[in-house]
Image (cartoon, helix red, strand yellow):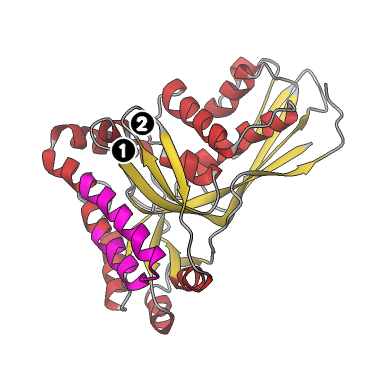
């Protein structure tokens, strides 16, 4: 048995610039961190070796891998000429919430299958393969930040070059700055799940056809670089302000990124004195992130008491194998 653990990610700035419609015209970049909430993927031989079992929100049991409905699991098993196994995934957080659960599953399963077959890949190579699978082979209208954001641990600055190359550089903070950042970042679940694909399709079309929306994304990449410098300098007030400025630009990229309900929660938070915030992921629902200093957090929590808060902190490890059982497979 092999078990992998892959963190979810929080993206602070630059989201959307990882889409090919943008980075082929202008270099993209994202500032993000992995967090201590995880996707776990287990793989081991099936009890009945003639069957392949995939368990996620439902259970599939097949004798022919081609008949698996889950597209990611099916494609990876076919690519690796693997059957007669049982794959089980569990997660700390539900899907469709803006924390990259889908890419965490892809990365975790690639890692698990590699370990099962005795192969070692770097975290960045795993991320590249996840991008190839999700974007090129399965045709998902998504970018590349999520695969790298969950595969490579820690706070990082990710660049998306016009030729399709991706580079990842760690952002090193003082212990004091990291502690303050961890203490002052709060996540609240809106209770709304979303389909990232539909929102991103509209956003892609808008970036191609409307100069203002393309220019918004250019400015958002500049904000990602400015935010990195603010963090390195320990200027967390500026970090929060850029969060707010970035959200104002992001919400204009597509019609369903926000909603009256989400705007209401965001405005309540700003009235409570938060420095800034944003909706995570493509938009439409999921988690609201706020930068809120400790002396204002009690008021914020009271004002948003009808939303579930997710306590979290940044993590450093990225995807990893956490268990290797005695080998009882070929």
Q: Nearer the viewer, residue 314 or 94?
A: 314
The Cα–Cα distance between marks 1 and 2, rounded to whole angstroms, is 6 Å
Q: How many other residues sit within 10 Å of disc 1, few (<14), some (14-19) or many (≥20)? A: many
Tell me the quarter of the picture where residue 203 sits.
top left
Could you tell me which quadrant the N terminus lies in? top right
Answer left or right for 106 relative to 163.
right
Answer left or right for 267 relative to 69.
left
Q: Which mark is residue 266?
A: none
Q: Are marks 1 and 2 in contact (CB under 8 Å)?
A: yes
Mark nearer the N terminus (1 vs 2): 2
Could you tell me which quadrant the C terminus lies in? top right
62 shown above or below 223: above
| Residue under numbered circle 1 | 200
Q: Position of residue 128 (x, y in %)?
A: 50, 31
156 shown above or below 63: below
| Residue under numbered circle 2 | 141
Q: Nearer the viewer, residue 46 or 8?
A: 8
* Badge 2 element: loop
């Amino acid at each position: 048995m092999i078990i992998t653990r892959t963190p979810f990610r929080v993206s602070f700035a630059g989201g959307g610039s990882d889409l090919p419609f943008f980075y082929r015209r202008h270099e993209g970049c994202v500032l993000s961190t992995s967090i201590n909430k995880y996707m776990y993927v287990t793989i081991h031989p099936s009890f009945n070796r003639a069957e392949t079992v995939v368990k996620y929100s439902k259970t599939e049991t097949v004798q022919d891998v081609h008949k698996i409905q889950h597209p990611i699991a099916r494609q990876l098993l076919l690519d690796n000429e693997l059957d007669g196994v049982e794959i089980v995934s569990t997660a700390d957080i539900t899907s469709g919430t803006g924390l990259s659960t889908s890419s965490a599953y892809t990365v975790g399963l690639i890692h698990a299958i590699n370990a099962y077959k005795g192969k070692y890949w770097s975290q960045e190579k795993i991320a590249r393969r996840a991008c190839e699978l999700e974007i090129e082979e399965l045709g998902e209208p998504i970018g590349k930040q999520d695969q790298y954001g969950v595969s490579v641990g820690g706070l990082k600055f990710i660049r998306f070059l016009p030729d399709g190359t991706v580079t990842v550089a760690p952002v090193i903070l003082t212990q004091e700055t990291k502690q303050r950042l961890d203490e002052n970042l709060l996540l609240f679940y809106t209770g709304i799940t979303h389909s990232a694909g539909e929102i991103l399709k509209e956003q892609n079309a808008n970036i191609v056809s409307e100069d203002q929306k393309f220019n918004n994304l250019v400015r958002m990449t500049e904000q990602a670089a400015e935010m990195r410098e603010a963090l390195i300098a320990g200027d967390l007030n500026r970090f929060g302000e850029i969060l707010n400025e970035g959200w104002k630009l992001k919400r204009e990229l597509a019609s369903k990124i926000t909603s009256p309900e989400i705007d209401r929660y965001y405005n309540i938070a700003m009235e409570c004195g938060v420095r800034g915030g944003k909706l995570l992921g493509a938009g439409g629902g999921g988690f609201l992130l706020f930068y809120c200093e400790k002396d204002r957090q009690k008021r914020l929590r009271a004002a948003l008491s009808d939303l579930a808060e997710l306590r979290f902190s940044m993590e450093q490890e990225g995807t990893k194998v956490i268990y290797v059982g005695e080998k009882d497979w070929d």
